[in-house]
Image: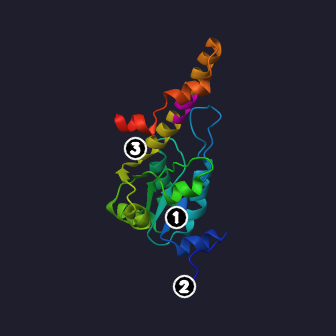
Amino acid sequence: MDQPHLRFTTDIRDAADFAELHFIGVGTPIDADGRSYDTGQVYGAIRQLAPHLTRACTIVGKSTVTVGTTSQVTALAQRLAPVGTGVDVVWNPEFLREGHAVEDTLRPDRLIVGLTTAEAEKTIRAVYAPILDAGVPLFVCDPQTAELAKGAANTFLGLKISYINAVADMCEAAGGDSLRSWRSSAPTPESAAAA
């Protein structure tokens, strides 16, 4: 306990020298076209980090990205890093509820990891060992599937919001109460147990 378990730095060279695992979690807002993500911050982080990577390491991307980003990030990182192909990139999208980020990070309902090497899977299993030991399922897939899983989750959330808005419109048109309508149609613990 004499050694600190958490240390902060703004020196990217120091972080590159110290760590064998690097998490990149930057913003990827919807692009101006409304159909893709602005991944400029992802590539910016890689351009800052990669030139200082002198030993084998794994970069873990957390951001919501367009399919194909992992392979492009891998090519860029390996081109810029002195260690070259010693840099492995995996995609591990986050599924965080607003206001519950810490809880959802420490106790997620699932982990999805897109990777291409056995060494990367071994690294991921080691870093998430306490979470996996608690029974959280780990879904290992290719990077494209991991990228799509996050996009699908975001789309499904939008679908649920659109649906309840349509229910509210119907209730308003019919003179009903949308909140009461939703509550009365939701399963109760008793009805769920009976089913």
- At x 35%, y 65%, the residue is 122
Asked whether the viewer can see residue 125, the reply is: yes
Asked whether the viewer can see residue 86, the reply is: no
The type of residue carrying mark 2 is: Met
Q: Which residues are magenta?
A: 157-162
SS assignment at label 1? strand
Q: Are marks 1 and 2 in contact (CB under 8 Å)?
A: no
Which residue lies under the disc numbered 2? Answer: 1
Q: Tell whether 141 sits left or right of 42.
A: left
Q: Quadrant of the N terminus?
A: bottom right
Q: Does residue 91 sit above or below 180 in this rendering?
A: below
The type of residue carrying mark 1 is: His
| Crowding near the residue tagged with mark 2, few <14, some 14–19, many ≥20 C-alpha atoms within 10 Å | few
Query: Who comes first in sequence, dot 1 or dot 2?
Result: 2
Which residue lies under the disc numbered 1? Answer: 22
Determine which quarter of the picture holds residue 172.
top right
Q: Which of 55/189 is in front?
A: 189
User: Which color scheme is applied?
Assistant: rainbow
Question: Residue 64: x percent and y percent?
Answer: 54, 45
Query: Who comes first in sequence, dot 1 or dot 3?
Result: 1
Which residue lies under the disc numbered 3? Answer: 145
Mark number, residue 3: none
Query: Who comes first in sequence, dot 2 or dot 3?
Result: 2
Q: Quadrant of the C terminus?
A: top left
Q: Residue furthest top?
A: 174
Gap in angstroms between the C-alphas marked 1 and 2: 24 Å
